[in-house]
Amino acid sequence: MSDGHGRPEWTDIRERGNLQAMRLLFWFYRHGGRFLVYPVVCVVVFYFYLTRSATRRHSALYLQRATNKPVTRWQVWRHHMAFARALMDRLGAWMGRIERTNVSFPGHATMLELQKKKQGGVLLGAHFGNLEMCRAVVENDGSLKLNVILHTANTENFNELLRSASDKAEVRLIQVTEVTPATAMMLKEKLDQGEFLILLADRLPPGNSERFFSADFLGAQAQFPTGPFWLALMLDVPVFFMAGYTTPAGYEASLELLYDGGRVPRSHRDAVCQEILGAYLQHLEALCRKYPLQWFNFFDYWNDDQNTNKRDAGVTGHNDR
C-alpha cells in the first residue's frame, strides 16, 4: 500500500513484496524455521532502517503520540524489529506453525454462535499486530470461514503464496476496487452462509483519498476510509473490531462488538458510520497505548511533514538529516 498520498513505503514489502523473494522466505521457514529465516528478515529491516530516514521519523512521531514520552533511537529500532517479528508470525500462521492452542481468542465462541444462526459479520481490523493470528485460530481447524477484502491488484499473488505456504490455507482473498450492487450481493450471500468479512479500516486505500472521515486519533486529527463503514451498514450485519497481537503471555486475538446490525436509513448512515468509527478508534487507541510497538504505519499518517508548524519527532540524539 501507499501512504495515502501516492508515495510507496517500505511496508509495501509485507503487502506487495516480490513473489520470488517471498517464496524463498517460505523455503527458509519450511526447512529451517524461525531460526534460519529470522536473521534474513532482520537484515532486510536493518537495511530499510538505515536508508529510510522518513520511516524513522514517522515511527518516532507515532511512538511519541502513543506513549506521551520522548522517543529514543532504540525504541524506533525496536518498532522496526516488531514489524520483522510480525512478518515471521505471519509466515508461521500461513504455514500452520501457529496452532489454536497458541492463541487466546475468547471471541471465537461468539463467531461460532453467529455461524450456527447462518449469520456472518464484518470484522474491522487495522495494521496492528497480526490479523493472521486470528486466521490461525479459526481457519486452520476449519471452524470458520474468513473472507479478506483487499484493495489491491495482487490477489492472485497472495493466493499463490498461500498455496505454496500450506495446504491448510483456506483464507479467501477478494479484490474490491469499488462496491457495486453485484459486489454487495456476492458479499451478502457469504454472510448469509455464516461467513465473515475482514476489512482494514485504519488507512486510506491507494488511489482513493478523496472520501474519508476525519477523527481524533492519539491526540491529533487523522483520516479514515469511509468504505469499510458504509459497506458494513449496507450489509446489515453485526460489526466487530478485531485484532491479533502479542502479549507477555503469548498470542492473543480480541473481538469487540461495534454495532449489532439492523437497517439504517440512508440519510442516517453517515452519522452511524462515524459512531462506529469512534468506537473502533477507542479500541485501536487503547491497544496502541498498551502495545505501541505493534502498530505498523511508518509514514506521514498525521500529515506532520505538510504542517508548517511541524512537531518535533522527539528522538533523543537522533538526526535524520
Image: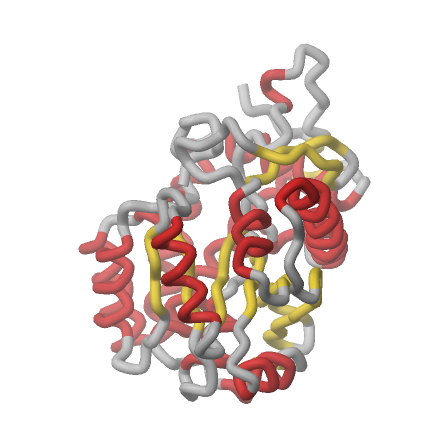
Residue 59, image x, y percentages: 60, 38
Q: Is residue 221 above or below residue 127?
A: above
Residue 181 horizontal side relative to residue 309, left or right? left
User: Which residue is located at x 44 percent, y 32 percent?
Assistant: 208
Name the one closer to the observer, 232 or 315: 232
Name the one closer to the observer, 66 or 286: 286
User: Which residue is located at x 28 percent, y 68 percent?
Assistant: 162
State how the image is colored.
secondary structure
Residue 92 horizontal side relative to residue 138, left or right? left
Question: How many marks are shown on the rendered structure?
Answer: 0
State the residue lying farthest toward the top: 308
Name the one closer to the observer, 293 or 157: 157
Residue 179, image x, y percentages: 41, 47
Residue 77 horizontal side relative to residue 181, left or right? right
Q: Is residue 285 above or below residue 87?
A: above
User: Which residue is located at x 65 percent, y 70 percent?
Assistant: 255
Image quarter hosting the C terminus? top right
Residue 215: in sight, yes or no?
Answer: yes
Residue 74: in sight, yes or no?
Answer: no
Residue 47, image x, y percentages: 39, 41
Residue 61 horizontal side relative to residue 14, left or right? right
Residue 18, image x, y percentages: 24, 49
Q: Is residue 296 above or below residue 108?
A: above
